[in-house]
Image: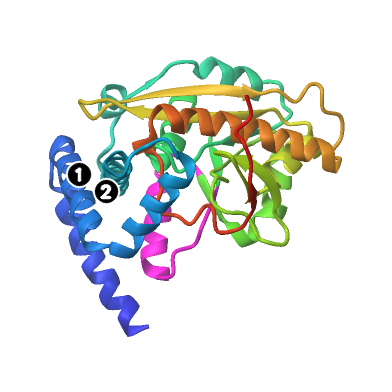
Amino acid sequence: MIRYRIEFILFQIFKWLVLALPLKSAQRLGFYIGSLGFHLSPGRRRVAIENLHLAFSDKSDEECISIARGSFRNFGISFIELLWFPNLTDEVFRKLLRPHNLELLNGRFSEGKGLVVLSGHFGNWELIALGMSYFSKIPFTIIVQKQNNIFVDEVINKHRCLFGNKVVPMGLSVREIIKTLHNGGIVAIAPDQSGDKDHGIYIEFFGSIVATHQGPAVFALRSGAPLLIGYMIRQHDGTYDIYLEEIQTNDLTGSTDENVRELTRRHLIKLEGHIRQHPDHWLWMHRRWKHTLKNIEPSS
């Protein structure tokens, strides 16, 4: 506990330094921190490069290293932007983010069936939840992983909830998800990390059959809530374009095992497509392929 308190004090000092910076300077700091992390985290760097070779067998070592370095930088920028959240104002939001089809979210939300909104650890996954909620004026219930340090975890969650959102820890989320959807609310989750070896379902992802979280598909099919996927693309000037797409569920009746598998496959295909277009935006340092059945040829 003493260690956690010392970590918290250091974390707070660093956060105050970040908050004292203009946004562009803060983003530049995140870029350099990510670059430093690439060189000082040999274990994570090795995992990232191994994952890239698994996903892109046609890419050279140099290409995989370059993408991995970009992924570390993306993570560094995203983390610093999260710390900078208390400085966000309406003017900053409108300069920083460009939502392109928010009417899709507003329209589906207005049907009163609830809404499941997916993202991945892609771009700034923290900022997309905050931004979509801010521009739509609809609060999100965000499913999050708890940090080991409870004091740091509390601060990060306050940042996530600055504009009306609510967070629910992953392990306590089932009842809250059901309640939120039953009341016509929005549940946001990033389910792209490795699923449980025994309880996940195995779906093709970059040519391999990997354990995948089935929760989003189960909740959408059981509640009848539409399923959307959101992603944001960082531009060279540090601004973001936000896009939303709907994952079709009209032809899937009931939460049968077959339908859950099919809906999970559909949203994983969407995510893979975005990662292929912007591979440096994704969090390659996670051991996504740790529970794999076998390699297969990518779907045509």
Q: Quadrant of the C terminus?
A: top right
Image point (41%, 45%), residue name? 52
**What is the number of the mark on residue 95?**
none
Segment colored magenta: 143-165
Residue tagged by mark 2? 76
Few, some or many residues within 10 Å of mark 2 (<14, 14–19, 20+):
many
Using the image as rendered, state which of residue 267 and residue 165 is in the foreground: 267
Q: Earlier in the sequence, mark 2 or mark 1?
A: 1
Dot 2 lies on which element?
Answer: helix
Few, some or many residues within 10 Å of mark 1 (<14, 14–19, 20+):
many
Image point (21%, 46%), residue name? 30
Q: Position of residue 128 (x, y in %)?
A: 43, 34
Dot 1 lies on which element?
Answer: helix
Q: Quadrant of residue 239?
A: top left
Question: How does the figure colour the protein chain or chains?
Answer: rainbow
Does the magenta portion include 289?
no
Q: Quadrant of residue 42?
A: bottom left
Q: Position of residue 143 (x, y in %)?
A: 56, 50
Q: Is residue 290 left or right of residue 224?
A: left
- Determine contact: label 2, label 1, CB under 8 Å: yes
Residue tagged by mark 1? 31
Q: What's the amino acid at mark 1?
A: Phe
Q: Is residue 20 left or right of residue 113?
A: left
Distance in Å between CA atoms under marks 2 and 1: 6 Å
Does the magenta portion include 158?
yes
Q: Quadrant of residue 157?
A: bottom left
Image point (72%, 46%), residue name? 179
Q: What's the amino acid at mark 2?
A: Gly
Where is 7 relative to 193, above or below?
A: below
